Image (cartoon, rainbow, N blue to C red):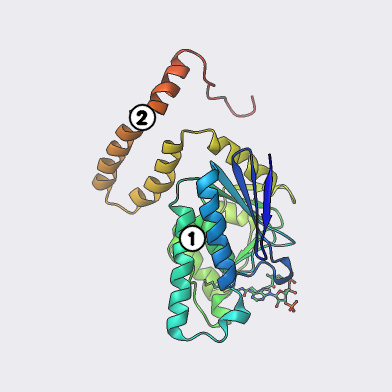
């Protein structure tokens, strides 16, 4: 049974264990103001409670135009810090929660929109998607985690270029830059993201938790530390009751095999 809840900023629907979260302020190109951040926090918490994977997309012609610049105009420095730290906290709920998040990108994926997409675990773009970081043109800086997440995805040299020159990156370029993992035809990003979400949702939940929480942390560790942590996580997951059942299912030929592409 599908369940829908529409707020002023975000739509939410749960269907077959997948949460579908839609940025829902198309008249402002899904620009994110303080209340929108709280609406995102609420649906992320809800998805964490009741879904096995989630897809986030934008209603209207664009994924997200980033920070709501109208609201930002009157902020004091300390209010700016508080705002940025709140974006960090909410995007960290996505990045380091318990379920995989797939973003379905189309149209503008700009500024804070790219920061939001960078907090998800897999990014799918349709051919209309374009990425930009126009913060320099607006006299500001990334504040939603972009210097950490987007820079790790594409590399600091490319991000520096985007921020200094206003370079706009196409979906195909974004794939070559590791900013997105899939490029699909116009209008197909949600369908592909949902297919990926269903695949991820069929994994053991503990394995998914390990993937989304351990991989980015291990990447930031020294090599030997990473190997040490990996062994503990490997042992912890592989000795869980679910792993035991899934391993037995494979050996008893009750589980699917890995299929070669195109078969
Ligand atoms: C906005 C915003 C916004 C649109 N804040 N109101 N982000 C930017 O610098 C991107 C600014 N936006 C744009 O470049 C374009 O709007 C788009 C390429 C995203 C879309 O273009 P288009 O032609 O489809 O829409 P539009 O006509 O430009 O915008 C429609 C309305 O949305 C218009 O308002 P209206 O009252 O005149 O109808 C726009 O003003 C409004 N709008 N984008 C406020 N961002 C945590 S730090 C993150 C830092 C950043 O994100 S910096 C990047 C900010």
Rendered position, 137 above or below 48: below
Q: Which mark is residue 28?
A: none
Query: Does the numbered disc 1 mark a residue whose Cβ is under 8 Å from ligand 1?
Result: no
Residue 29 x, y percent position in the rendering? 69, 68
Q: Quadrant of ligand 1?
A: bottom right
Q: Which residue is mark 1?
A: 91
> Residue placed farthest to the top in the image?
252
Rendered position, 241 above or below 171: above
The image quadrant where one finds the N terminus is top right
* Disc 2 residue crowd, few under 14, some 14–19, many 20+, Cα 10 Å: few
Element carrying mark 2: loop
Query: Does the numbered disc 2 mark a residue whose Cβ is under 8 Å from ligand 1?
Result: no
Residue 173 x, y percent position in the rendering? 61, 56
Mark 1 vs mark 2, CA separation in Å: 29 Å
* Disc 1 residue crowd, few under 14, some 14–19, many 20+, Cα 10 Å: many
Rendered image quadrant of residue 234? top left
Q: In the rendered view, does 125 fall on the left or right side of 117?
A: right
Q: Look at 28% across and 36% down and name the residue there.
A: 231
The number of numbered discs placed on residues in the rendered structure image is: 2
Q: In the rendered view, does 208 fall on the left or right side of 171?
A: left
Residue 114 x, y percent position in the rendering? 56, 63
Q: Is residue 6 visible?
A: yes
Residue 86 x, y percent position in the rendering? 46, 69
The image quadrant where one finds the C terminus is top right
Q: Look at 45% across and 65% down and name the residue there.
A: 88
Element carrying mark 1: helix
Q: Which mark is residue 240?
A: 2
151 or 201, nearer to the observer: 201
157 or 78, nearer to the observer: 78
Which is nearer the N-term, disc 1 or disc 2? 1
Rendered image quadrant of residue 7? bottom right
Q: Look at 47% across and 86% down and name the residue there.
A: 76
């Amino acid at each position: 049974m599908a369940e829908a809840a529409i707020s002023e900023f975000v739509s939410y629907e749960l269907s077959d264990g997948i949460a579908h979260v839609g940025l829902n302020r198309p008249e402002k190109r899904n620009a994110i103001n303080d209340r929108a951040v709280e609406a995102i926090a609420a649906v992320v918490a809800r998805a964490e409670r009741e879904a096995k994977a989630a897809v986030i997309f934008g209603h209207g012609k664009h994924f997200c135009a980033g920070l709501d610049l109208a609201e930002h105009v009157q902020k004091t420095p300390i209010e700016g810090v508080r705002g940025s730290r709140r974006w960090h906290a909410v995007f960290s709920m996505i990045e380091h929660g318990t379920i995989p998040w797939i973003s379905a990108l189309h149209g503008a994926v700009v500024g804070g929109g790219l920061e939001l997409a960078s907090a998800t675990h897999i990014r799918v773009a349709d051919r209309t998607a374009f990425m930009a970081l126009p913060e320099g043109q607006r006299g500001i800086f990334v504040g939603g985690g972009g210097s950490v997440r987007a820079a790790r995805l594409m590399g600091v040299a490319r991000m520096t270029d985007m921020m200094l020159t206003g370079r706009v990156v196409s979906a195909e370029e974004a794939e070559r830059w590791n900013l997105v993992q899939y490029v699909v035809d116009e209008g197909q990003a949600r369908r592909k993201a949902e297919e990926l979400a269903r695949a991820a949702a069929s994994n053991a939940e503990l394995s998914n938790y390990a993937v989304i929480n351990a991989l980015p942390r291990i990447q930031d560790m020294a090599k030997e530390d990473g190997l040490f942590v990996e062994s503990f996580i490997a042992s912890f997951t592989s000795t869980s009751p679910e792993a035991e059942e899934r391993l037995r299912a494979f050996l008893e030929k009750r589980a699917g095999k890995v299929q070669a592409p195109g078969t």
